[in-house]
Amino acid sequence: MSGTSSRSREPELLVERLKRFTDQDLNALCEATDAAIIDGGGFGWVTPPGRRQLETYFRGLLLVPERDLFVARLNGDIVGSAILVRPPRNNEAQAFAASLMHSYIAPYARGHGLARMLTEAVEDCARELGYHILNLDVRDTQTVAIRMYESYGYIRWGEHPEYALVRGKSVQGFFFYKRLRPPKSGGQ
């Protein structure tokens, strides 16, 4: 018998770009999303929309060519996600910038560094695809996320005083960007 108990084992952490779901993956993703929404996460919904709507959303997401779904796994189970959104092909003027959207880790899986891993994976993919800038926005109530993004080099460039309406109350939002590669000549 080894001297290592199951309690002392390090958790298995993984972030991946997901191309298709297993039923188990989709179920875990919906559960994590529900938990994040209930906890006040910035997924966009204020109350969980129901399993059918979440499943439809995530299945549809995989069909959109300009969107890439990244998931965070804790011991094999999906516990969070983020989306890399590329500009549409007809937006030549902003073709250098992509967006990080709907990034969250379920409350029961926080504290392992998965949010940072998820952010790094999206940034790495955006760099590989040739993007120079990564944009994101968050509610001002998401103080932990804001601190993480700022510590990771994101620059706050703007505020919106009525960014979201949560339970009848206006919530301020902050807009951030991060340069992923040196500027092109001419200021890009």
Image (spheres, rainbow, N blue to C red):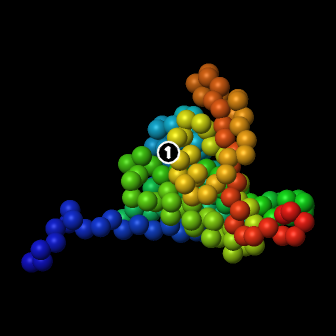
Residue 147, image x, y percentages: 53, 47
Q: Residue furthest left?
A: 1
Viewed as shown, does residue 184 lie left or right of 114?
A: right
Could you tell me if residue 76 is visible in this image?
Answer: no
Q: Is residue 170 left or right of residue 152?
A: right
Which residue was labeled with disc 1?
144
Q: For the image shown, how many numbered marks are present on the structure? A: 1
Location of the N terminus by quadrant is bottom left
In the image, what residue occupies the spot 45% across and 56% down? 79
Q: Is residue 116 left or right of residue 138?
A: left
Q: Is residue 87 visible?
A: yes
Q: Determine the residue positioned at 49% across, 45% down.
A: 144
Q: Residue at x 77, y 61 (%)?
A: 97
Q: Is residue 5 above or below residue 148?
A: below
Identify the residue at horizontal 53%, vertical 61% (top origin): 118
Q: Residue 153 or 11: which is nearer the viewer? A: 153
Q: Residue 96, position in %: x, y?
A: 81, 65
Q: Is residue 16 above or below residue 155?
A: below
Disc 1 residue type (three-letter):
Val
Quadrant for the C terminus in the image: bottom right
